[in-house]
Amino acid sequence: MDTTRARYSGILMHVTSFRTRYGIGDLGREAYRFADKLKESGVTLWQVLPLGPTGYGNSPYAARSTFAGNELLIDLEALVSEKLLGANDIAFPPVFDPDHVEFDRVREYKLPLLKKAAANFLLSRKADKAYRSFKKANAFWLDDYAVFMTLYDEKYQDARWMLWDEKHDSTTIKRWEARAEVYKVLQFFFQKQWKALKDYVNSLGIRIIGDIPIFVGADSADTWSHIELFKTDESGAYSAVSGVPPDNFSATGQRWGNPVYDWGRHQESGFEWWLERIGRQLELCDILRIDHFRGFDAYWEVKASDPTAEFGRWTKAPGKAFFKALRERFGELPIIAEDLGFMTDSVNKLRKDNKLPGMKIFQFGFTRLPDGSWDPYDTFLPHNWEEDFVAYPGTHDNETIMGWYKGLDDGMRHFVREYLGCGDEELPWAMIRAMMLSHAQYAIVPLQDVLGLDNSARMNTPSTCNELNWSWKVDVAAFDDYRISRLRHLVKISGRNGLTYDERIKQIEAGASKKE
């Protein structure tokens, strides 16, 4: 037994999913209440989705900026406490859907209030020392983002900057700099509130796992301000976009549409943009999950003119040099590699060489062999997991445990019950228990599965764009004493308290000496 290796457990719950009076989860009281419940349950990790400001489709994986925070997460009540808003300003919010975020209605309600608070801040506190320090430390991305969003709001009402008359240059930045100050203040509000929440969460012995997509949005401040880092044609338009090749699920593959990187330009600069990006995210979170890790080894590149992904090609990326640069800047990398899908030997080597844990999805383990029998050797079944993995029943892109189970045929449901040794009603907890008792060093459970919810609580259905995606909300009170107690028991018996064996023995000895 390795007595120096700790085992961890946590909950996946995005900030937008807290039910509040203001239509969307925020960095206020419900987030702190949830952190307290995590502490009671004994888990030591809280995983969130990307924190950036979302655009069309409301996906946090297609943010307006990979550096900025989502302004809609700012707590209005804190702004009242700071006298930047009056109590009457937020006394009568609209009646919002209690179960789903109505993003357009939330924007219509919240953004004017946030901008009013920012204007009040600028009238009274523009010389605030902390604000000036924030602007200086984040100038690399903040100036561009603030101007981008101001142009989007006030002139174009359209984030497809390729259609704008004003391109990114020093003249544009200077012309709009004064009007863009409001967005800088909003980012300062986000930073201040997020830091306070993170400090509180960390004080409870809990670390936050953030999430960073490998690609950025086509209509983002990132591409507007650094188009030279992406593949373009002679006219300046994107020449290639990302996706995945045809498979059993799609005969034409998936055309994601994100612009692909000109890795040669990144490498020439010493990956400076990426180093700034990772550094910013490590400032916000303790651990990072990098989405689509295999793209650092090779990615599926599709001509921008192609309507589908079937005629794309695998293009190599400088993963070895990239992670070397990251280690030189940040030392040991607190990164989780999302290594799902078709993995090659070179992808696996890149992950292992950089000592990054991969991912295992329990739902994926229940497969049939060609003769119709079940496959006990499937690498996604927990008895086959190795230590260097983060285990999930499913992620934000998957069905909930109960939704997934109800969709199986009778034969597969029988195998699931046999494997877990339980009946239908106990299935979520039996699945969580098997995962917690596995060899995987990390075990993360979506809150939906702790609550035993069906697919009405699903966070996202890939390859669809509808108002239910990313919109699920729940009252934190649903994470009640009964569920907290059951989770705490599993943390205890699986040793997933974040302590190494040696640390646990010292803790026990210290407690015994106090009693003496």
Image: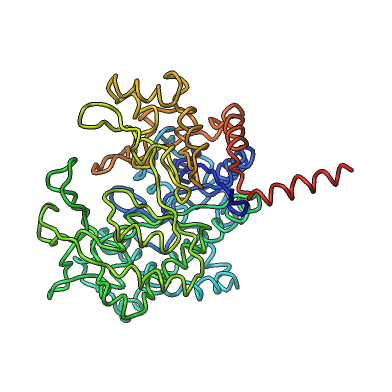
The answer to which image quadrant residue 368 occupies is top left
For the image shown, how many numbered marks are present on the structure? 0
Q: Position of residue 148 (x, y in %)?
A: 33, 67
Q: Answer left or right for 516 relative to 96.
A: right
Nearest to the observer: residue 66 or residue 155: 66
Q: Where is residue 275 in the image (x, y as percent from the top left)?
A: 42, 71
The answer to which image quadrant residue 83 occupies is bottom right
* Residue at 61 percent of width and 56 percent of height: 199
**Quadrant location, the C terminus:** top right
Q: Position of residue 276 (x, y in %)?
A: 43, 71
Nearest to the observer: residue 73 or residue 268: 268
Q: Answer left or right for 112 relative to 498.
A: left
Q: Where is residue 24 in the image (x, y as percent from the top left)?
A: 45, 43
Above or below for 497 versus 424: below
Q: Is residue 206 in view?
A: yes
* Residue at 16 percent of width and 69 percent of height: 237
Q: Answer left or right for 496 relative to 162.
A: right
Nearest to the observer: residue 367 or residue 166: 367
Above or below for 264 versus 307: below
Q: Is residue 102 in view?
A: no
